[in-house]
Amino acid sequence: MSNVAEHQASNTDEQNSSASVPVISPGQLLRAARVDKGFELTRISEELKIPESKLSALESDDFSKLASPTFVKGYIRAYSRYLDLDVDFVVRAYDSLATETPEHDYIIPQQTMRLEPVEKPFPEWRWPIVIGAIILSLVVAYILWGDEIKAMIDPSQQIPKTEVQVAPSAIDDTVVDSDLIDDITPIPNPFETSDQSGVIDFSQANEDPELTPDSIDGGSELSSDAVSSDSASTSNDNLTAQVQHPVDSFKSLLASGSSKLSFVFQEDCWLDVKDSDGRTLHVGLKSSGETLTLTGQAPFTVMLGNARAATLQLNGEPVELTPVLGRNTLRLQVGQ
Amino acid sequence: MLMPKRLRGMFSNDLSIDLGTANTLIYVRDRGIVLDEPSVVAIRTHNGHKIVEAVGVEAKRMLGRTPGNITAIRPLKDGVIADFQVTEKMLQHFIKKVHENSWFQPSPRVLVCVPCLSTEVEKRAIRESALGAGAREVRLIEEPMAAAIGAGLRVEEASGSMVVDIGGGTTEIAIISLNGVVYSDSVRIGGDRFDEAIVNYVRRNYGSVIGDATAERIKQEVGCAYASSEVREIDVRGRNLAEGVPRSFTLNSDEILEALQEPLAGIVQAVKSALEQSPPELASDIAESGIVLTGGGALLRDIDRLLSEETGLPVIVAEDPLTCVARGGGRAMEFMDTHRIDLLSS
């Protein structure tokens, strides 16, 4: 047996157990095996179709003359297989040499370096950025909507919110309750409410999109909603009664006797009037020039289809009927 | 969890997928090959609903052994998608599998390797199924280019390199220079055709039927492409057609060589025609350095010897030929952010 083969055999166990790096170079191994077998380079070159110059470069460990490491390894494999050497052993010997020299690997040439840089990959420091962004957005949210968040957390501060929430339910009945809109603004003097009950704070009404529903239209819709709006109005009564407890003294004054409502219509107008018990005092269409006088228990819930065409007096005192800008319908409570 | 793909993408890795007919490999940036499973999906039909029963290794074990309500499907055929929905499900499963420790549903950027002669429809099918599987961005790269990069060839140099990637469904041949494909060809011969040839040979000569899995085992253990002095043998069992009962018989490597003649001749012919059509400068480069074999077919014993004898050129088998394409795709992906590489599309 050749000395190379012996060397290889002695190393096989070692490499299996500890995967040690062979100290002998692949070129030396190949040359020794070839000489031992008495082969000529020309013959091997013909058999393996590898140019003779490349084989001799392999044997002298001159890898710079050869192509990329892929080919070098390929040649070494083919050559050692031809010489019946342990292919993996020789390749490992080459690897240990190759790691000492700089890795010839996939290199992008200079001329393509500046071409079309695409978006950068998301880097490793993404976590702190993402967490920071989340915290920042939470802080911003607190600054912007802090009061609402507080109100949500603390139910004792929910009273102003309730008023705002009631408004949409009234809107569901396709009628704007002018009193409810008034409720949003503080009432400085409760005794002025009878006069101001019809007054609408336009700026506020326009600012709040929920309070100016587009669905509000003429009287035809109002008739269908008359019954449901009734229940809504009674619940509103409870609410306003809760909030406006200073009004109670005035209300009791009115409650001692029945009140008188006088309507004068300049144009056709649909009308619905209910007294404090929810009884309907009048419902129907009034034509131009008609007058109507109703008596009953105040406060009255009045709905007008064409509020601009009517004037109203409560116990001889005029009540202002001005609907929201651009609307003709009005719902209000009179005599509170 | 429903979140925009972009946001989920922050928590996903970039993947390079070698969506092969036989095996699907996934390479993750900085982690290497993380998944290598057969492209097989087992589907259970229950009350008219189709449920994915198993994917990958598990499903492959079921191939040819399923009851009526389960079908084990290979959704890719000849390198392209044959069953779009099943491919999508399979990709979804694999992408999820490589993101096992992720909190969110992954949405990675994906580079998929496609056969070089695939049509626009086939490319689109691959892209859409990757997008359907959750990818937020899909790029395609030609398989031989990825294979060349994965094999460690210097594709960026002004020197021709020839790669022959013998996959499960197709054999891709390409001559590459300056980061581009100069010539490419794809023949629908691959590992599957080898298996098929072995099945046919056994049926013809032994009157027995063997399954694809057995044929594959025969190919891996005793298959060879060039006659050598070493003859190997294998015992196999198949159903005898005349008697109808399982019979055992022995096959040797010479018989398998005979069985594989036809598909091997097809590959040799394709390689020769590629050499014929290569520009003379590149042909001389190839003659000097040689041809590189990648893909699972390169593991067939002495296939390098066969091609070397037929072409008269040095033929080498790349290191770890099975993973060359996926690794090359991964390497291309690392560069595609900063440099332009000849990718098919973005």
Image: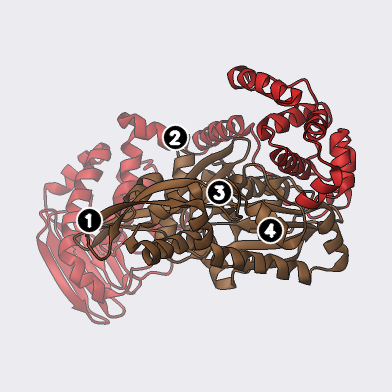
- Depth order, front residue of B317/B332: B317
Q: Quadrant of residue A176?
A: bottom left
| Nearer-N-terminus badge (4/1) | 1
Q: Which residue is mark 3?
A: B6
Q: Amino acid at mark 2?
A: Asp
Chain of the residue under label 3:
B
Q: Residue at x 69, y 40 (%)?
A: A81
Disc number at residue B307? 4
Chain A: give its colour.
red
Q: Are marks 1 and 2 on the same chain?
A: no
Disc number at residue B298? none
* Whole-number angstrom distance, CA of label 1 to CA of label 2: 64 Å
Q: Residues within 10 Å of mark 4 (few under 14, many from 20)?
A: many
Q: Is residue B105 visible from the viewing direction of this image?
A: no
* Whole-number angstrom distance, CA of label 3 to CA of label 2: 33 Å
Q: Which residue is mark 2?
A: A147
Mark 1 vs mark 2, foreground winner is 1
Q: Residues within 10 Å of mark 1 (few under 14, many from 20)?
A: few
| Mark 4 residue element | helix
Chain B: give its colour.
brown
* Whole-number angstrom distance, CA of label 1 to CA of label 3: 42 Å
Q: Which residue is mark 1?
A: B67
Quarter of the image with the N terminus of chain A is top right
* Whole-number angstrom distance, CA of label 2 to CA of label 4: 80 Å
Report x, y in % for residue B52.
32, 53
Q: Circles 4 and 1: CB distance less than 8 Å? A: no
Chain of the residue under label 4:
B
Q: Are marks 3 and 2 on the same chain?
A: no
Q: Residues within 10 Å of mark 2 (few under 14, many from 20)?
A: few
Mark 3 vs mark 2, foreground winner is 3
